[in-house]
Amino acid sequence: MNILYLSHCAPDLPDKGEKIRVHHFLKRLSKRHRVHLACLCRNLDETKRTQSLDWGLASVYTEVLSPKAALARAAVRYALGRSLAVEYFNSSQMSRYLAAAPWRGEIDAVLVYSAAMAGYADVEVPLVLDLCDLDSEKWFEYDRLRRLPLLYGIEGRRLRRFERSACERAKATILMTENEASLVREAIPGARIEIIANGVDFGYWQPAAAADGPPSIAFVGQLDYFPNSDGAEWFAREVFPAMRAGWPELEFVIAGRNPGRQVNELASLPGVRVIASPADVRPILAAATAVVAPLRLARGLQNKVLEALAMGKRVLTTPQVARTFGGVLPRGVDVCEGPEQWLAACKAAPFEPQPEIREALRQVYDWDAAANRLISIMENAKPLTSM
């Protein structure tokens, strides 16, 4: 079967939330079928690594997307009534490449990662949309938490129209969780919905002994992503001071790429440390008494939660993150609201990794099982005349 895989991000390394899924799915899909990849990269290093993947891909097209140029282009088109998120990833260069590709007529089905890439897919070819989550809902939530609510509300409505069109056209729309599927069923009744959660790389995220040090709680994430920076700042200013009053030795460690000024300033607060772009977050997680995911805005599936659980750590989180798992929370997750609950859960967390947390997670979040489900969906999307 010939598949065109369109991705808004590079699959080179599973080192960022959005890249984890395409990395693992593409690696497994290419073992079973002939896959042509077309993706957008953030820099030349991503391009080089993607072009060097040894997964037997039929062809690889990469294009470096300049954030400044893409945002400027999207802003102009937003003023003309289009979706900012969609136009950010709209490249005429990629469109020309796909239109002229010599294998274009051989494609049996197109797999699109994120709604914004659906515009590249040939309308004559069956489409499978790996939506993951309903991104327009995030913009509506930004409307509540951020300044310029009018801008976010308008973008939410525009993106929702685009998502509706893509979902209604797709043979299957894939979501990460039942929570996201419920949102899509309500917003886009015509969508044909499938649910495939992410897996976890259990070989990489293994329990480890911690070095000696003061008791700590850790938050790890991409720190230039608003839900993460907002959660870190809210927790450091509104929750952690009360926790530290009840446990004076406790530290709050914030670690991740690209912390902005507001996140870096948190390091001036008593007991708070900010570690920018650590080479490896696993020692930070291993050293923590517990891991926190203090997000006030959460969509899709929180890989940071799964990775900490795979290391056998307890994860303390908000009701907003808990809702993304639907009615069944993974073992080892504690939902906290007031500072007293956060502190009590932290004090109750065993310092040593808990094997039962890791093993319970392994039963549900498996990349091979997830990829097999995706492969089945792709094979069912293939026209009968092509079999």
Image (tube, grey):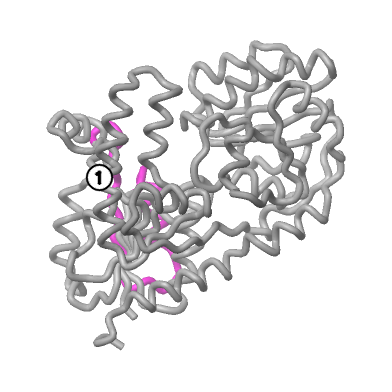
Q: Residue 354's x, y, as percent?
A: 83, 50
Q: Which residue range is magenta in the image?
A: 41-69
Q: Residue 80's x, y, as percent?
A: 12, 32
Quarter of the image where one finds residue 342: top right
- Relative vertical location of residue 1 with respect to residue 49 in this rendering, above or below: below
Residue, x 84% and y 19% (percent of image)? 247
The quadrant in which the C terminus is found is: bottom left
Quarter of the image where one finds residue 127: bottom left
Q: As shown in the figure, which amino acid type bears the numbered disc 1?
A: Arg
- Relative vertical location of residue 115 with respect to residue 318 in this rendering, above or below: below
Q: Residue 119's x, y, as percent?
A: 22, 54
Front one among 163 and 191? 191
Q: Residue 108's x, y, as percent?
A: 27, 76
Q: To which residue does mark 1 refer? A: 161
Residue, x 55% and y 57% (percent of image)? 198
Q: Is residue 30 visible?
A: no
Q: Check residue 56 for magenta coloring.
A: yes
Residue, x 40% and y 39% (percent of image)? 137
- Relative vertical location of residue 46 with respect to residue 227 in this rendering, above or below: below
Callout 1: SS: helix
Quarter of the image where one finds residue 249: top right
Crowding around mark 1 (Cα neighbors within 10 Å: few <14, some 14 to 19, many 20+) is some
